[in-house]
Image: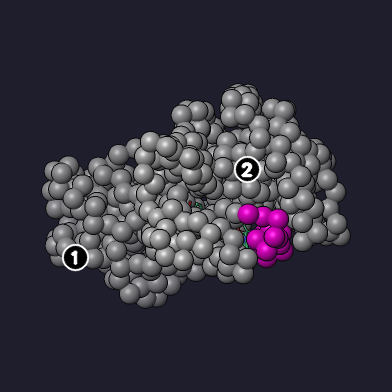
């Protein structure tokens, strides 16, 4: 049982700086995936709830846009401090609703999320909101009212990754968290109020994607939609946004490859790949779900990967011995087990894990860390995003073949290259069509832009690019007696060349 105290106030929307009752008659049960018990019931928000929150954001947007940057930065300083002070509570909430082991929740979910928020103190502080280009004053203005829609897998981090740069750009936000994990966002709403964010600048509406998410996307009061989630839902958001030619930013799924070159340290590369595949129980968009090894080393790689996977201990997330928590939901468990069964049926060789329940864990949505070898490019497990701790080992004939296989996917989010020669490994990384590639275990850099090629998304988050995403750009041409204008000077009835 969780010790988490979820107050009644935390189970409503947060609109205009106050807890707000929903128009909805029904509710959504938030389930603890390790106990299968109901943690809380939140409103199944309606389209009317979403529109109400947009109106609150629209009312607050002009004032926040006019607020000097120094004041917006002071809010961010308070936010970072409060996130640190309430880190334990946030981590417990994430453990309860996502199932993330306690240490992972504290370090990766909350620690990294706070780090990303803090990174904008410097980025926004030094951001060039205005510059002169010749006689043009070019200003970056807030995009307006932003709807942020996020998934459940790393919920706080993905939320802060959007809302902090949006707020620093001067935008007002309506946030819709995943219906599976809304509680951390409601806690965040309370924290923003403790930091004296003016009412209406940040709002949270909970509910289902096709209802609340769709209503936000279609609302003419929303200027920009920033979405993270599946390709399926991302496509719907893009289509709905296209009607109003609304700006839509998409962070979607992945099917990334970890390429082990012939001169790499195979043991190090395989160990790191299995660890990355098991991170957050395999529920990570940047997962390296395909391990590409030279054909003659496939057997050795399979043995190493099986050993590494066998070292993982699935278990209750609050147990200090656990390093693999449950999957988020019964549906996720069924989907991941289905993929594992399909891998076996399609002829991949199972060397670790499998679709069977984890021994001794009768309650909770646990899956065994699973490794397949002899996976061919046409198999479903090599093509589709599984979103669980499942690794597919594939062989290649030469370096060009490795690059071809890595790029043979509609996705383009992430990847890894391992090699004895850093320059050569980096040259291979340049050929991978993804938004990020780690070379020889280069660590995550929260200042580097993150996002996808191809169907993995449109736009970038994190770093300077993350802030630019929430700005509009205006050029004002000022009279300049000292220089010639670039291009013709047009007057009424005159095309600038003396013709009319
Ligand atoms: P999902 O697409 O089912 O849901 C994501 C969010 O979209 C939820 O809040 C959901 O309610 C909402 N939604 C669903 N349908 C909608 C619609 N028609 N209109 C508006 N909103 C809608 O995804 P999920 O299962 O929550 O998350 C897993 C997916 O997210 C994976 O594909 C994963 O790769 C991806 N993801 C991507 C990144 C990234 O940065 N690229 C990060 C994390 C997760």
Q: From the viewer's perspective, is residue 109 above or below residue 309?
A: above
Image coords of residue 32 (percent x, y): 66, 48
Determine crowd level at label 2: few under 14, some 14-19, many 20+ residues with C-alpha closer than 10 A. Answer: many
Based on the displayed image, in which of its 4 quarters is residue 344 positioned? Answer: bottom left
Considering the numbered disc 2 on the image, is that residue within a helix, a strand or a loop?
A: loop
Based on the displayed image, in which of its 4 quarters is residue 259 positioned? Answer: bottom left
Q: Nearer the viewer, residue 58 or 48?
A: 58
Q: From the viewer's perspective, is residue 142 above or below residue 206?
A: above
Q: Write down the residue under mark 1.
A: 401
Residue at position x 17%, y 42% in the image: 422
Image coords of residue 346 (percent x, y): 37, 76
Q: Write down the residue under mark 2.
A: 171
Image coords of residue 394 (percent x, y): 27, 63
Residue 1 part of the magenta segment: no
Judge from the rendering whether residue 415 lies leftward or rightward of residue 20; answer left or right.
Answer: left
Q: Name the quadrant where ligand 1 sits.
A: bottom right
Range shown magenta: 207-223
């Amino acid at each position: 049982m969780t010790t988490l105290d979820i107050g009644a106030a935390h189970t409503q929307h947060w609109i205009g700086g106050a807890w707000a009752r929903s128009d909805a008659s029904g509710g959504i049960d938030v389930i603890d995936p390790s106990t299968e018990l109901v943690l809380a019931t939140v409103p199944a928000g309606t389209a009317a709830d979403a529109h109400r929150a947009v109106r609150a954001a629209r009312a607050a947007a002009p004032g926040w846009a006019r607020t000097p940057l120094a004041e917006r930065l002071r809010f961010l300083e308070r936010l970072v401090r409060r996130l640190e002070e309430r880190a334990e509570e946030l981590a417990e909430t994430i453990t309860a609703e996502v199932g993330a082991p306690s240490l992972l929740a504290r370090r990766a979910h909350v620690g990294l999320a706070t780090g990303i928020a803090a990174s904008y103190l410097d980025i926004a502080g030094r951001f060039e909101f205005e510059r002169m280009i010749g006689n043009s004053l070019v200003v970056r203005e807030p995009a307006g009212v932003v709807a942020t829609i996020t998934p459940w897998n790393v919920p706080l981090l993905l939320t802060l990754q959007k809302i902090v740069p949006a707020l620093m750009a001067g935008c007002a936000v309506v946030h819709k968290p995943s219906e599976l994990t809304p509680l951390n966002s409601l806690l965040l709403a309370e924290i923003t109020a403790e930091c004296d964010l003016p009412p209406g600048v940040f709002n949270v509406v909970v509910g289902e994607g096709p209802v609340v998410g769709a209503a936000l996307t279609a609302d003419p009061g929303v200027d920009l939609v920033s979405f993270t989630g599946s390709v399926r839902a991302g496509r719907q958001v893009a289509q709905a946004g296209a009607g109003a030619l609304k700006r839509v930013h998409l962070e979607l799924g992945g099917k990334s490859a970890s390429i082990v070159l012939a001169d790499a340290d195979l043991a190090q590369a395989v160990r790191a790949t299995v660890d990355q595949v098991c991170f957050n129980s395999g529920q990570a968009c940047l997962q390296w779900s395909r391990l590409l090894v030279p054909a003659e080393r496939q057997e050795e790689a399979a043995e190493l990967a099986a050993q590494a996977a066998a070292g993982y201990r699935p278990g209750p997330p609050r147990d200090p011995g656990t390093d693999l928590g449950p999957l988020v939901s019964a549906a996720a468990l069924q989907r991941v087990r289905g993929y594992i069964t399909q891998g076996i049926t399609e002829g991949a060789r199972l060397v670790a894990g499998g679709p069977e329940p984890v021994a001794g864990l009768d309650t909770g949505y646990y899956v065994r860390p699973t490794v397949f070898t002899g996976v061919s490019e046409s198999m479903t497990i090599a093509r589709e995003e599984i979103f669980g701790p499942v690794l597919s080992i594939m062989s290649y004939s030469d370096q060009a073949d490795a690059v071809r296989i890595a790029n043979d996917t509609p996705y383009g989010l992430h990847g890894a290259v391992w090699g004895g020669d850093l320059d050569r490994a980096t040259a291979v990384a340049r050929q991978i069509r993804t938004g990020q590639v780690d070379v020889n275990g280069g660590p995550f850099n929260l200042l580097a832009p993150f996002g996808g090629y191809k169907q993995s998304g449109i736009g970038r988050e994190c770093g300077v690019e993350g802030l630019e995403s929430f700005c509009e750009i205006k050029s004002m041409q000022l009279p300049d007696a000292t220089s010639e204008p670039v291009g013709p000077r047009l007057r009424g009835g005159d095309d600038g060349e003396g013709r009319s």
